[in-house]
Image (tube, rainbow, N blue to C red):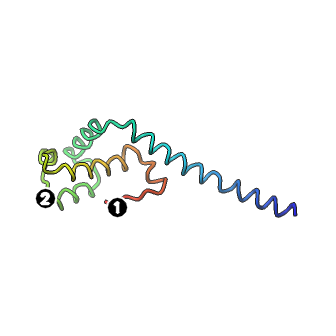
Amino acid sequence: MKSKIKKLLVSVIAILPIASVSFAADYNLEFSEKNLDRKETEKELLDKLSKNSLPLKYYYFLEDKGITSSEQLVLPDFDEERERLLDEYIKDFVDPYARVSGIISVF
């Protein structure tokens, strides 16, 4: 009887850290989204785009959408694409905890 209780207790304790990390990552993701200055982050994204310092997936996305420059990206016609890039940038660089908590990018 004591052996079964010990095994149950050890197994419960063993899974607690995993759940705690997941909860902390989700909490941090929610907290960061509320305090994020999207305009400042967008400027940072556009700056990195113009310097060609982002992963290739960003440039492939722009190529697929027919966007050839950062100046073209900021036009009102491309608001949806810019927001999608910004969301991806936030997930990849600003708040990478999203990857830990189980959110998968479907870029």
Residue at image point 78% right, 61% down: 7
Q: Amino acid at mark 1?
A: Val
Q: CA distance from mark 2 to mark 1?
A: 20 Å
Local SS, label 1 = loop
Residue at image point 22% right, 43% down: 46
**Which label number is shown at residue 66?**
2
Query: Does 27 appear above or below 81?
Result: above
- What is the x, y in percent for residue 37? 32, 36
User: From the viewer's perspective, is 57 left or right of 95?
Assistant: left
- What is the x, y in percent for residue 42? 26, 41
User: From the viewer's perspective, is 78 left or right of 96?
Assistant: left
Numbered label tally:
2
Q: Amino acid at mark 2?
A: Gly
**Which label number is shown at residue 106?**
1
User: From the viewer's perspective, is 53 left or right of 9?
Assistant: left
Mark 2 residue crowding within 10 angstroms, few (<14) / some (14–19) / many (20+): few
User: From the viewer's perspective, is 22 left or right of 46?
Assistant: right
The quadrant of the picture occupied by the C terminus is: bottom left
